[in-house]
Amino acid sequence: MALTVEQLQEAGAILTVAETVRAAAAQLRQRFPGIQASVVDPFDMKGETPAVKTGDRAIYLMSSDGHCWSITQDPARASAFVLTGA
């Protein structure tokens, strides 16, 4: 499943208002059932550019060729969210 820019903005809004990053991931899984959502330590994404940043929280978009995962800035190629933050 690919995302639109509007859906990415919605994901950012969910991240902003969620009580915790884990709660945001759960909400993203419900809202976008075709997109995976994981939470990792911010250190794991050190040096990478988030697609969305709000305060100390961030969303990175991941794409897969069916074998390997890579970070993408293109919502149309996204198949997973990786969230970081408090």
Image: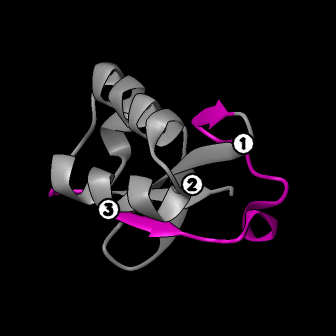
Q: Residue 12 location, x and y as percent?
A: 46, 32
**Foreground tag (2 vs 3):** 3
The span shown in magenta is 33-54
For badge 3, the amino acid type reads Ala
For badge 2, the amino acid type reads Ile
**Cβ atoms under marks 2 and 1 closer than 8 Å:** yes
Q: CA distance from mark 3 to mark 1?
A: 22 Å
Which residue bears the numbered disc 1?
49
Tell me the SS state at disc 2: strand
Q: Residue 16 location, x and y as percent?
A: 52, 34
Q: Residues within 10 Å of mark 3 (few under 14, many from 20)?
A: some
**Cβ atoms under marks 2 and 3 closer than 8 Å:** no
- Compared with 57, 7 (above or below) is above
Q: Residue at x 82, y 68 (%)?
A: 43
Which residue bears the numbered disc 2?
71
Tell me the SS state at disc 3: helix
Q: Residue at x 73, y 62 (%)?
A: 45
Residue 16 seen? yes
Observer-nearest of 67 and 49: 49
The quadrant in which the C terminus is found is bottom right
Residue 52 part of the magenta segment: yes
Q: CA distance from mark 2 to mark 3?
A: 21 Å
**Foreground tag (3 vs 1):** 3
Q: Residue at x 66, y 45 (%)?
A: 57
Residue 50 part of the magenta segment: yes
Q: Residue 31 location, x and y as percent?
A: 19, 46
Kindly indicate the quadrant of the structure image that contains residue 70: bottom right
Which residue bears the numbered disc 3?
26
Residue 74 seen? no
Q: CA distance from mark 2 to mark 1?
A: 9 Å
